[in-house]
Amino acid sequence: MSISPLARVASNSVVEPGVVLGAHVNIGPFCVISTGVVIGEGTIVGSHSVINGLTTIGRDNTIGQFASIGEVNQDLKYANEPTTLVIGDRNQIGNKSTIHRGTIQGHSTTRIGDDNRFLNGVHIGHDCVVGNATLMGDNSGLAGHVVLDDGAQVGVMCAIHQFCVLGAHSRVADQGGVVQDIPPFVMADGNHARPTGIDINARAFLALDTRQQDFVHSLYSMLYQQSLPIDEVKIAVKASLRDFALAAVFERFFAQSTRGIIR
C-alpha cells in the first residue's frame, strides 16, 4: 500500500493493501478501494463508491456518490483475466455511474481520456475507447467495444450498440438509439438514429476557418445528399489529406468503422 500523507480517507472506508493514492486524493465515507487500484493526485471519490480491479485513475478527477468503477465486465466469456481500466485526468464522473474493465477478446483495456463529463447514471461497457472532452447525459450507456471520439456528445437516456463508432464532435440527441456509426460532426436523432445535419454549433466546428467548414459540409453532402458509395467518399477523404489536416479525422473514422454508417 502506498498512500500519500496528503491523501484523506474517511475512517469508515476500506482501502485494501496494494492501493496507491496520490497527494490530495479524497476518499469519502463508506467507499471500498480494492487491491490493484491507483488513484492520481487530487482525485475526489464520493461516498459509497466502489473502485476495484486493475484500475488506474489519473489526476484531478471527480467521481460521484455510489459509483462503480473498474467492476467485472458483463461479457459472459470473461473468466477473471487480469484486464484493466485506465482513466485520464480531469474527468467528471456522475453519481451511480458504472465503468467496466476490458476483456482479452477486446483490447484488454477500457480506456478513457481527459476532460470528459459523464452525468449521473452513465454506463461505459468493457473495451470502450473514449477520447477527450466528450459528454454523456444522464442514464446513457455505451455497450462493449464502443469508440466515443474526441468532443462527441451523447444526450440523456441514449443507448449505443456494441462496436459502434461515434466520430469526433458528433452528437446524439436525447433518447437516441445508435446501431451504426456516426461520422465526425454529424448530428443524429431517433431510434434507430438517423442523420439530421452538421453540428454547426460544436466548438470544434466554430474554430474551423470557412474553407475547412465547407470541407465538412461537402463530405456531408457526399454521404447524405448525393448518397455516394462509402468507398467513393473514402477516396475523396484520402485525396484531401494534403490540403486539409481535418481529413485525417474522417480517415480515422472510416478506418475504425465496421458496422456501416447511419443513413
Image (cartoon, grey):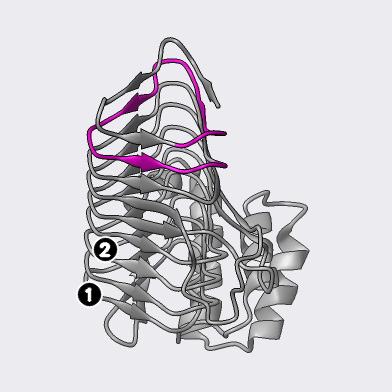
Residue 260 percent coordinates (x, y) = 57, 85
In front: 234, or 140?
Answer: 140
Query: How far, Cα to Cα, is label 2 from label 1?
Result: 7 Å
Residue picked out by circle 1: 175
Q: Quadrant of the N terminus?
A: top right
Q: Which residues are magenta?
A: 16-36
Q: Can residue 199 be seen from the camera position used here?
A: no
Q: Secondary structure at mark 2?
A: loop
Residue picked out by circle 2: 155
Q: Secondary structure at mark 1?
A: loop
169 shown above or below 189? above
Q: Amino acid at mark 1?
A: Gln
Name the magenta segment's main secondary structure: loop
Mark 2 or mark 1, which has the lower sequence index?
Answer: 2
Checking the image for residue 78, the label placed there is none
Residue 81 falls in image quadrant: bottom right
262 shown above or below 134? below
In front: 212, or 196?
Answer: 196
In front: 178, or 143?
Answer: 143
Q: Amino acid at mark 2?
A: Gly
Residue 255 percent coordinates (x, y) = 70, 70
Residue 198 falls left or right of residue 241? left
Residue 210 percent coordinates (x, y) = 48, 48
